[in-house]
Image (cartoon, rainbow, N blue to C red):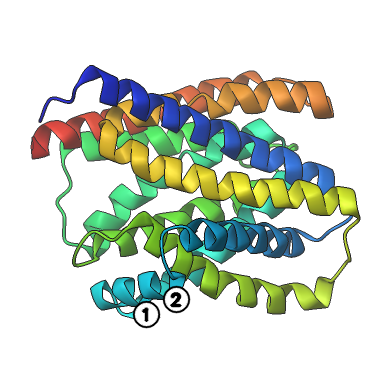
Amino acid sequence: MKKIALPAVVAGALLMGANSLVAAMDGVVVRFVAGEVHPIGIVFFRNLASLIALYLLLCRRGFPLGIAQSSGRAMHFSVHAIRAVIKLLALVAAFIAVTEIPLASATAIAFTMPLFVALGSVLFLGERFSAARVLSLVAGFAGILIVVRPGAATFQSGAAWALASAVGLAIVALLMKVSAEREDPLSIAWLNLLVTVPVAFVMALPFWQTPSLFSLALMALQGIGGLFAQLSFARAMKLADASLLVIVDFIRLPIALILGLVLFGEPIRLEVVIGGAIILGAIALLFHREGKRRG
């Protein structure tokens, strides 16, 4: 594996930490706004804010349509559209989950996405099962069972929504893996938002609730933060190894635990901490072994 200069590693870790903080705050905004706006509506306003922010950013670099056209040559627009819709549905599922289960539980389950990517790579992309992959998958899904406690009186449908979101995001990642060549993160984000904003608007119409100015401001900040997090993640992946970044990203769980306790009175459940730690260990093992194999 190639060695990376320390300053680049530190910068990548800091960007990943910023991404993780914004991701944790995402659920907080949903909790505050969900009593007034349906989760699908939240997705629409969030993505609309991201689209406006990205348009303004791209205007400083050139005409946005040119970026969309150059990206379209790298991958057919229909693939972008499918990927965008799946990501939209995954975001809706994640927001519904946050309204039904504690923030920390939803966050711990969200960490399983790389495990579903590993499983999908074997089932659909022809990659081989290695001992590390098998061990990571078994440990990771054991962690899920500890967090969601299937059959327990406290189990809620929100856990199923969180799992559905993780699976959806894994499918998006798999579609990214089959891309013929790497694409600019700005291009991907632009085409994704061009598709998801109108689709989310149509989906939100049956549940339409006009938000207050306060809720609108929160969702606008959420959308801008989401765009910043997406670009920070893309940049972090270029600066540091994924095995390091996945560990940095785990700060989302203690942040979610603290925010859930302070803002919403959610008790810190020991099984969420244990299950989350097992999931983290499984993912860290997976990335470490895959990195050594490819290096």
Determine crowd level at label 1: few under 14, some 14-19, many 20+ residues with C-alpha closer than 10 A.
Answer: some
Q: Viewed as shown, does residue 140 lie left or right of 177?
A: right
Nearest the camera: 22 or 103? 22
Q: Is residue 139 above or below residue 55?
A: above
Inspect this view and state whether residue 276 appears: yes
Inspect this view and state whether residue 35 appears: no
- Name the image quarter holding the C terminus: top left
Q: Viewed as shown, does residue 195 lie left or right of 244?
A: right
Q: Viewed as shown, does residue 104 lie left or right of 85?
A: right
Q: Are marks 1 and 2 in contact (CB under 8 Å)?
A: yes
Nearest the camera: 59 or 283? 59
Q: Amino acid at mark 1?
A: Phe
Tell me residue 88's x, y (percent). Answer: 56, 64
- Label 1, label 2: how far apart the Cα atoms are: 6 Å
Tell me the number on the disc at residue 109. Answer: none
Q: Quadrant of residue 63?
A: bottom left
Q: Quadrant of residue 239?
A: top left
Q: Viewed as shown, does residue 173 lie left or right of 143?
A: left
List the residue tagged with mark 2.
81
Tell me residue 242's x, y (percent). Answer: 29, 34
* Secondary element type, mark 2: helix
Residue at position x 51%, y 56% from top? 57
Q: Amino acid at mark 2?
A: Ala
Q: Is residue 133 above or below residue 93?
A: above
Tell me the number on the disc at residue 77. Answer: 1
Residue at position x 51%, y 31% from top? 18
* Secondary element type, mark 1: helix
Nearest the camera: 109 or 81? 81
